[in-house]
Amino acid sequence: MSIRLRLTLLYTGILALTLVVFGATLYAIQAQSTLNAIKEGIVLSSDMLVRSIFLTYLSPTIQEPPTAPHTTIPFEILSGEQALKDLREREIVRVLAMDGTLIASPFGTVDALPISETGMQTLHEKNIWWEVVAPEDERLLVLNSPVSVNGEPVFIIQIARPLTERDRSLTALSTTLIIASLLTTLTAFGIGWVLSGTALRPINRITQTAGEIEGENDLSRRVDHRGPNDEIGRLAQTFNSMLSRLQEAYARVNQALGMQRDFVADVSHELRTPLTTVRGNLDLLRRQPPLPAEERADILNDLVSESDRLIRLVNDLLILARADAGRNLLQEPVPLQPLVNEVARQVRLLDPQREIIETVAEVTALGDRDAVKQILLVLLDNALKHTSGPVSVAAQPSGDQVALSVQDSGPGMPPELLEHIFDRFKRGEADPNVPGFGLGLPIAKALAESQSGTIRIESQVGTGTIVIVHLPLFLFQP
């Protein structure tokens, strides 16, 4: 069952229930009010008869009431002419003895209106008794009133009024209420169906747009909602915002997949050369007759060199993979002066003739000591490879950060190369004699960012290159 049908049925059900309650209440009020009006009229007629009609009978000239069974007295004998004229039209009057036999009635009618046993007992207890009877298929409302003489009930006055008109009016009222309620309910169902369809139309558009996006795989589509900023408007905005985030995430995933494919291709290319060299040298060693001892020694040297190269490549890839995986790095104070001195001393062992200028303030960074050391080693190694002149390394406070820089006096790099300098396997020169795989700067960038830091390069052709790493500054708090 659709939401539209459920909303329409709920709305129609509530309206139908309201109409039923309203109609039943109106019917009950009308029935009770008309019944009370009839009772009031009957009570007035009964009081008039008690005060006026029986004055004649209760006069001293009449001592005993007629008690002969089935003997009726014309009503004119018991009442004066005025009392007869005051009787309401269509009111039925009977005068009964206390045993229920008829004493007097208009026009000599011989039938008394029936009284139940409970009613007779109530009348003997000097209380009035209301009863609805239908002696001739016509419902009558009867008031039975006892008349007492000297404290003893001697007569029963019956005054009845037909309920035909009341029943007819109530039947017409109930029929009108039922027909009006049915028509109103059907009309409300149609109106509710239209209104719910109008209210849910934006949701249908959202559903249709989602289906089209799924079918076409087009995350650039958006829901066009021009209505008010109500619940549906906010739903459309949320849906569009979700599509924007999905589009961005999808683009990042595609970019990551592309980078992964390029990375795998570059790794395969870098591994192929040393592996090919190793394979070729092994074939030479297996040649029969064996090569001379001097040639075998050269081949073994080549194998060791290529094996070392493979080990360096695997180590670089391992470091880069750990950085990409978001390996948790320590966040602890790292005094930079002793760390820079230690790294510079290790680098001088690789090239004792190279001048390394240290300008390090007594400043402490917040990060991982091993990661900071790896960054310095990468930057100094790159500087030694690309220049034959002195290399400067500095560490100075910069606001709430530490600026760690390495500068060389090499040939520099053109702007078009700087745009891709942090791409993996992207080398800053085309000279194959310069060792390296193009992974050093990507490793330094990944490690810096893992410590909430940044890295940037400034270079001009002919003037050298400077690499600046910013790391969080450790603020001592006693």
Image: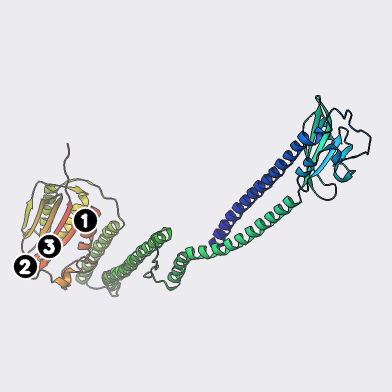
Closest to the camera, between mark 3 and mark 1, is 1
Depth check, mark 2 against mark 3: the one in front is 2
**Secondary structure found at label 3:** helix
* Residue that numbered label 3 is attached to: 383
Where on the picture, by quarter, is residue 274? Answer: bottom left
Q: Secondary structure at mark 2?
A: loop
Whether the residues at callouts 2 and 3 have beta carbons within 8 Å, the answer is no
Is 125 rendered above or below residue 53?
above
Residue pointed to by mark 1: 448
Q: Position of residue 136 (x, y in %)?
A: 85, 49
Q: Is 414 left or right of 303, judged from the image as shown? A: left
Q: How many residues crowd mark 3 within 10 Å: few (<14), some (14–19), many (20+)?
A: many
Q: Which residue is mark 2?
A: 463
Q: Residue 313: give x, y in percent of width and height.
A: 25, 63
Distance between the alpha carbons at the discs numbered 1 and 2? 26 Å
Q: CA distance from mark 3 to mark 1?
A: 18 Å
